[in-house]
Image (tube, coloured by chain):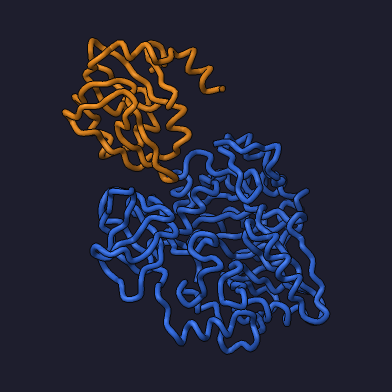
Chain colours: A orange, B blue
Amino acid sequence: MSENGLRFTKTHEWVKVEGDVATLGLTDYAQHELGDIVFVELPEIGREIAAGDVLTSVESVKSVSEVYTPVSGEVVESNAALEEDPSVVNSDPLGAGWIARIRMKDPGELSELMDAQAYEEHKKG
Amino acid sequence: MTAEAGTARKTALYERHVAAGAKIVDFAGFAMPIQYRGIMAEHRRVRETAGVFDVSHMGEFYLSGPDALATIQRVTTNNASSLDVGRVQYSAMCYEHGGFIDDLLVYRLEDRYMLVVNAANTEKDRRWVEEHLVGETVFEDATDETSLIAVQGPKAEAVLLRIAGPALADMAYYRSDSLEIAGRTALVSRTGYTGEDGFEIYCRPDDAAALWDAVFEAGSGFDVEPVGLGCRDTLRLEMGYALYGNDIDDRRTPVESGLMWITKLSKDGFIGKEAIVERKAKGVDARLVGFVLDGRGVPRHGNAIFSGDEEAGVVTSGTFSPSLERGIGMGYVASGVDGEIAVGVRPNMKVPATIVGLPFYKRGSVRR
């Protein structure tokens, strides 16, 4: 899956928007920095979150990393497949490695995010 | 994160690692490969066939002259007097107060002894040994003139036989010999830090790249790949091998660290002996143990260990074990604590764990 149509955060999450639902995951850059991922804590369905909150954490062999949500709303789905096989976040971070879906309270928050080109610049910086 | 290769020192094999796509990090002042394909894949490679490590950052000292053995006997805990030429011995150096300076290998070579020390301690160890030379001992720091390649895995012998000659097969565990490999002279020992069969190849830096290439050429058809310091840590931890700086340091003695087996109290006059004898007589407050997590999570250095509701110790090494597929670790627990414990993997999260005997991984191909 290409990075077109996705929006990106400074903390290396990607967001795909369909209607009022945002799907979120870690970028290829993030999974590469983390190394082999061994556990993904999945956020609770129904949980209310605010933009900037820690949504969950991802554990690699070498360290733990927090996953932040750039949007406020309610967690409506989480990727149960990651319980069995967290390595999907490494092998397909933008596709099958999605982490959670959030029903957004304020889609205006998306304007804070970067497009693919801006994210490329951010990674270099 | 990437190292600033401009400030960190490079081994003779640095360009090989970059060309292979390694993730390079600063380790003990050296730009070293932490992983190439990934820690889990590389770990499995070493357990299944063979992996090749560049560990040239480690320190090597030569001791020669009539009192070389006397110096080694003074500064190390193990007894080196019974070593014949070609024998290698795991040992340690301690301060007067019994705390560890380093753990190391002692090689008896044809005309001298060689000490192989941890990269992070090379400077400290050199000063210590130089300050404690006995009589007419000649000391030489050969670190900068020595590269070190470790080939580890059940296929290591088969691979190296192609280039090192048939004598390699007769080399017993913890023995060394000078061999010709790909037309270069190297010191080879059947040693390692992984729990698999394997060899460590000491050579001149000018020969390192040629030897590295020769190993991979010999390895074609055997599924051999370069492997980094990341899997070196997971492999050694699965074996319960101590890592200086984590499991042992100057605040721990051999008594509580389970290293009395390399501490020969029958040997007279080694530095730290009195303190160690006293500690053994008094009994220790804590002991180094291995444990496996019984829930989801990975123990990390510094995590608290609990026995019931009481804080009872600290994790010194932790990781996710690729072989056991669960968190494993080593740490110090209060004397008397055994069986079920809990590990504080996050400030508000305790995961149940069980103290187990070492090694965690019991199917390694290491020779005994």
* Residue at image point 44% right, 49% down: B44
Residue A77 on image: x %, y %: 20, 26
Query: How many numbered badges does the structure rendering display?
Result: 0
Residue B349 on image: x %, y %: 28, 49
Drawn side of residue B145 relative to residue B257, left or right: right
Q: Is residue B99 above or below residue A12?
A: below
Q: Is residue B89 visible?
A: no
Drawn side of residue A124 relative to residue B184, left or right: left
Q: Is residue B140 above or below residue B322?
A: below
Q: Is residue B318 above or below residue A60?
A: below
Between B30 and B151, the one nearer to me in the picture: B30
* Residue at image point 58% right, 43% down: B33
* Residue at image point 63% right, 49% down: B215
* Image quarter of the N terminus of chain B: top right
Between B47 and B242, the one nearer to me in the picture: B242
Residue A73 on image: x %, y %: 23, 21
Q: Is residue B102 visible?
A: yes
Between B188 and B327, the one nearer to me in the picture: B327
Drawn side of residue B97 relative to residue B205, left or right: left
Q: Which quarter of the picture shows residue B332?
A: bottom left
Between B64 and B49, the one nearer to me in the picture: B64
Q: Residue furthest left?
A: A46
Residue B358 on image: x %, y %: 39, 67
